[in-house]
Every structure is written in C-alpha cells, then in structure tokens.
Amino acid sequence: TIGLRPEVFQIGEPGIEVVGEAVEHTGSETHVIAQFGHQTIAAVSRDRTQAAYGQSLSLGIPQDKVLVFSPSTGARVRS
C-alpha cells in the first residue's frame, strides 16, 4: 500500500493521468479532487492551475515523497 500527502502532487507535471472531479481555487492554493481508476485522489498546489471539473490532467509524483505501508499491519515501511 502506498500513501501520498495531497501537497506532494505536482499538478500539470508528467506522471499519472487523472480526471478532475472538483476544483477549488482558494486564493493561495488550488485544491483538486480527482479520479484515478477507482481511487479518489486529493491534490493541493500553491500555484494557480488551469485544472477544471471533468478535465483530464497529469499529476507528477516525486518518488522521494511516496510513503509505503505494510498491507498486513498498516505500519509504515521505511527504506
């Protein structure tokens, strides 16, 4: 199992392709709720983005920010 904090996604950078389900521009941040297959993903960016509802967009994932958890115990696996 992997975990990613919403602020580590890089909206608009090469990575996984998602579909925006909700986009909220809050002034200093942009919050995006998106679908990736059957998973719902939350992403937060300090940059103003052009993300929009129903739009396909890319989310970059810095590999050093991926958290890995044991599926049997739920404990974080440190590398």
Image (cartoon, rainbow, N blue to C red):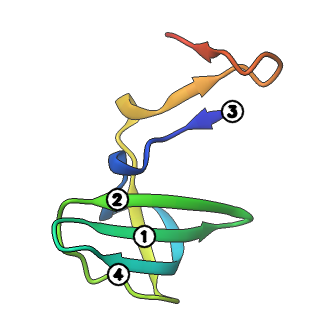
Q: Nearer the viewer, mark 3 or mark 1?
A: 1
Q: Give the Cα distance between marks 3 and 2.
A: 21 Å
Q: Is residue 24 left or right of residue 39?
A: left
Say which mark, if any, is on residue 32: 1
Q: Nearer the viewer, mark 3 or mark 2?
A: 2
Mark 1 crowd level (few <14, some 14–19, many ≥20, 10 Å Cα): many
Q: Amino acid at mark 1?
A: Val
Q: Give the Cα distance between marks 2 and 1.
A: 6 Å
Q: Residue furthest right?
A: 72
Residue tagged 3: 1
Query: Residue 49's spot in the image, x, y percent?
Result: 24, 76
Residue tagged 2: 44
Q: Which residue corresponds to the image point at 19% horizontal and 60% vertical from the top-left?
A: 46
Q: Amino acid at mark 4?
A: Ala
Give SS at disc 2: strand
Q: Amino acid at mark 2?
A: Val
Q: Give the Cα distance between marks 3 and 1.
A: 22 Å
Q: Give the Cα distance between marks 4 and 1.
A: 8 Å
Give SS at disc 3: loop
Which of the two labelled residues, at mark 3 and mark 2, occupies the earlier sequence position? 3
Say which mark, if any, is on residue 51: 4
Q: Is residue 34 left or right of residue 61?
A: right
Q: Which residue corresponds to the image point at 58% horizontal and 25% vertical from the top-left?
A: 68
Q: Amino acid at mark 3?
A: Thr
C-beta proximity under 8 Å, tags 4 and 1: yes
C-beta proximity under 8 Å, tags 2 and 1: yes
Query: Observer-nearest residue: 25 or 79?
Result: 25
Give SS at disc 1: strand
Say which mark, if any, is on residue 56: none
